[in-house]
Each structure stands twice: as C-alpha cells, then as structure tokens.
C-alpha cells in the first residue's frame, strides 16, 4: 500500500470525501426519501440503491487509486556509482530506452519519469494528482479513470434528481424553514455537481486522449511518445485489462499482473 505524506494531498482527499458524502446525504434523504418516499413509491428504494452503488464504486476506485503502487521503479539494493556521470566524464547509458535517474541514482525503464513529490521514478507516469495524493502511472491509471467516470455518473444522477424534484414539487418555493433548508441543499448540490462534472470531463478527455495516442501527458509536453501503432482495443486493453469491455468499469484487476521490466545485461555492470 502506498501513502504519500503530502499535506495538500490529504486536504484534497478530505474535500473529495466531504463532497461525496454530502451529495449522498442530500440525494438520499432530501430528494429521494424526502419526496418519493412520501408517496410510498417503489422508485424511492430503487433510486437509493442505484445512487449508493455508484458512490460505493466511486469510493473503491478512489481508494485503489490512492493506495495502489502507480509503478514505482525499484531502488537498487546496493548503491550504484554514477559519479562519472555527475562529473560529466561519461555519457548516460541508454539501451532500449533505459536511462539513469540522477535523483534516484538508479536505472529506470523506458517511459519512466521522476516525480518530485513522490521522490521516485514512476513507470509510464502521466502526472501527479493531489486529488488521489498519488501519481497516475502504469499500474493505477485504470482506477483513476474509473474514479473520474463514477464522479461523472454521480454528478449527472444528482443533477437529474434535483431537476425531477423541482418539476414535481413546485410548492417547495413556498416560504417555510423546511422548504428553505431543502432549497439551500439542492442549490449547493447542483453547484457542486456541475463543478465536479466539468472537472472530470476535462481530465477524462485528457486521459482518454493519452491512452488512445499512447502518449502520457509528460510525453506530450516533451513531444515524446512510444511510437507504437496500437488499435483502440489494444490501447484500452493495456490500461483496463484483457476482459470483456463490460468489465472495464469494475475497479478491480482483470487479467494477470504486468511484468516488471529487467535491466539490459550490459547495464548491470555499468
């Protein structure tokens, strides 16, 4: 399990769960049970079940994105002497994309980059996200995208429930303490949901573009890339797993673990 001791990351995680649980409270108790429940409608428990299922999957995806190893390059068990590189007396070894990280002082596989917040090199690093207090890398990108997807679903569902409530309960505009409280909660929920929805749409589009183009955000900024020609199915399978696309939305591993790359033999003795 990974845990970054970053204050900004902890604050972002707190804000995330505070917003999620507040939305769950308003939708469940003020909109569904407080409206459909009064009519003893069968849709009340069905909507509660659907929305809370989304919240559970959202929470699992987020926790896995937070605690999963994003693809940290293992540090050497014994110190490797790179003094000749620091002194400029030699060229940085590179074979099949392998390079030397001057901060970690170790060899790193192709498409790895050093994160100054994590203090480690991350395989296929896309960016460091404070909302998960972790890097988005090769091993946890799926969970991050699932988190974005479920936040989007929850936001759309919450906005839909507010619209339905406003249309079916026009009397909520009448002045009373209960009505004013419910109005305040629904307005805050709509604002929160719209902000989160815009956020996940923007980040989600960036993530899908990175997957389909096989170039992480860092590689796009550096104008680098894997130069591989992958089909859409192959590119998605690398991130979401080998199973049927219907199972890609589940925040669980599908297929075997990705193999760790071994250093080329000539680098073992550098």
Image (cartoon, rainbow, N blue to C red):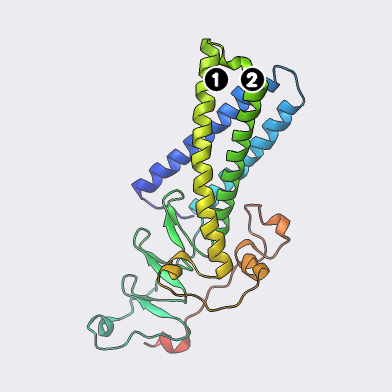
In the visual, does 46 lie left or right of 197? right
What residue is rendered at 51% in x and 11% in y?
Answer: 177
Q: Residues within 10 Å of mark 2 (few under 14, many from 20)?
A: some
Q: 193 or 254, which is in the foreground?
A: 193
Determine which quarter of the picture holds residue 120: bottom left
Q: Position of residue 2 (x, y in %)?
A: 46, 55
Q: 145 or 170, which is in the foreground?
A: 170
Residue most toward the left? 87
Q: Position of residue 214 (x, y in %)?
A: 55, 70
Q: Secondary structure at mark 1?
A: helix
Of label 1 and label 2, which has the lower sequence position?
A: 2
What is the distance, in whole Å, between disc 1 and disc 2 at their CAs?
Answer: 10 Å
Residue tagged 1: 182
Residue tagged 2: 34
Residue most toward the right? 42
Does the CB distance between marks 1 and 2 fall below 8 Å?
yes
Determine which quarter of the picture holds residue 204: bottom right
Q: 161 or 77, which is in the foreground?
A: 161
Is residue 55 something that shows in the picture?
no
Instruction: Judge whether 144 appears above or below 265 on screen.
Output: above
């Amino acid at each position: 399990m990974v845990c970054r001791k970053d204050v900004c990351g902890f604050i972002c995680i707190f804000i995330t769960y505070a917003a999620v649980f507040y939305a769950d409270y308003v939708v469940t108790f003020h909109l569904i049970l407080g409206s459909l429940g009064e009519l003893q409608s069968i849709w009340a428990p069905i909507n509660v079940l659907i929305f809370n299922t989304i919240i559970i999957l959202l929470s699992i995806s987020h926790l896995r994105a937070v605690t999963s190893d994003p693809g940290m390059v293992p540090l050497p068990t014994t110190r490797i002497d790179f003094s000749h590189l620091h002194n400029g007396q030699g060229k940085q070894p590179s074979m099949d994309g392998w390079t030397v990280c001057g901060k970690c002082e170790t060899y790193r596989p192709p498409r790895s980059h050093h994160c100054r917040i994590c203090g480690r090199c991350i395989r296929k690093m896309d960016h460091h996200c404070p909302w998960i207090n972790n890097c988005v890398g090769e091993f946890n990108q799926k969970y991050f995208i699932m988190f974005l997807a479920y936040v989007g679903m929850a936001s759309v569902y919450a906005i839909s429930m507010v619209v339905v409530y406003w249309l079916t309960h026009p009397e909520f505009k009448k002045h009373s303490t209960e009505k004013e409280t419910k109005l305040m909660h629904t307005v805050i929920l709509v604002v929160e949901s719209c902000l989160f929805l815009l956020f996940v749409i923007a980040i989600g589009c960036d993530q899908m573009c990175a997957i389909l183009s096989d170039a992480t955000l860092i590689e796009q900024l550096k104008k680098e890339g894997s130069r591989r020609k992958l089909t859409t199915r192959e590119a998605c399978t690398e991130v979401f797993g080998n199973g049927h696309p219907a199972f890609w939305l589940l925040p669980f591993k599908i297929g075997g673990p990705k193999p760790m790359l071994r250093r080329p033999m000539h680098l073992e003795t550098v």
